Image (tube, rainbow, N blue to C red):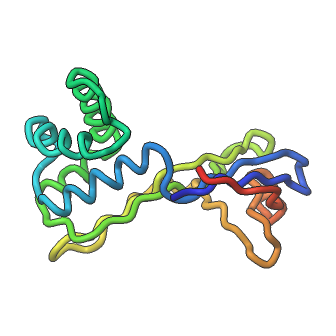
Amino acid sequence: MGTRVYTLCNYCNDEHIYIIGLVGEIFIIDQFLKIWKTKQKNFFQRENFDNDFVSFIKENKVFDGVSESEIQTQLDVVYKFVNGFFNPREKELLTKNILLSHQVEITPVVNSDLEESKREVANIPILKLEFLNEKPYIREYSKNVLYLQYNETLKAFICPRSLQFNAVVIRNEEA
């Protein structure tokens, strides 16, 4: 699963939160891609989605005792979320190729084009898809997006303001 890391920066004296891994809604995307890999169906078509995902929801113990109308409401929410998550290029790749593997997780970044005082940690999804007879696809962001790395020796992340390893880890929690 994922981790929420709290830091205190020695440079700007602010606390920052870095989220890493498979968390929250990204777990839904991971499950969606696992089912896609297994079934190799176009789940952007609503009928395919409903037929296969209703069993996934019903198998999840969280939904024990939940009415059919509530399950349908959850299907609607998940379907809209999944369709909004993937860009047109990713949808095309998924529907026209055989998915072999995937990786999806959250990673911390910063927009380096902003003034130092306005830069904040943004936690964005990283997506990698591997297909049969295709080059791996990796979701790309603009060139001004800098990945905020962690230094094990210093026990610190790159601060979004100083862009140095000044954000010292205070505590971690499961996200």
Which sits in the foreground, 101 or 158? 101
Give the side of residue 98 with respect to residue 13, left or right: left
Give the side of residue 10 with respect to residue 5, left or right: right
Asked if one can make out residue 53 in the rendered structure from this viewpoint, the answer is yes
Which sits in the foreground, 59 or 20? 59
Residue most extreme to the front: 65
In the depicted structure, whether residue 113 falls above or below residue 140: above
Asked if one can make out residue 138 in the rendered structure from this viewpoint, the answer is no
The x, y position of residue 62, in whole percent, is 37, 39
Give the side of residue 175 with respect to residue 142, left or right: right
Residue at x-position 31% and y-position 45% = 60
Image quadrant assignment for residue 102: bottom left
Residue at x-position 51% and y-position 54% = 106
The x, y position of residue 103, in whole percent, is 38, 64
The x, y position of residue 68, in whole percent, is 20, 25
Give the side of residue 24 with respect to residue 11, left or right: left
For the image shown, how many numbered marks are present on the structure? 0
Image quadrant assignment for residue 167: bottom right
Which sits in the foreground, 71 or 4? 71
Which sits in the foreground, 69 or 41? 69
Residue at x-position 25% and y-position 46% = 59
Residue at x-position 25% and y-position 24% = 67
Residue most extreme to the top: 69
The x, y position of residue 174, in whole percent, is 62, 53
In the depicted structure, whether residue 127 falls above or below residue 45: below
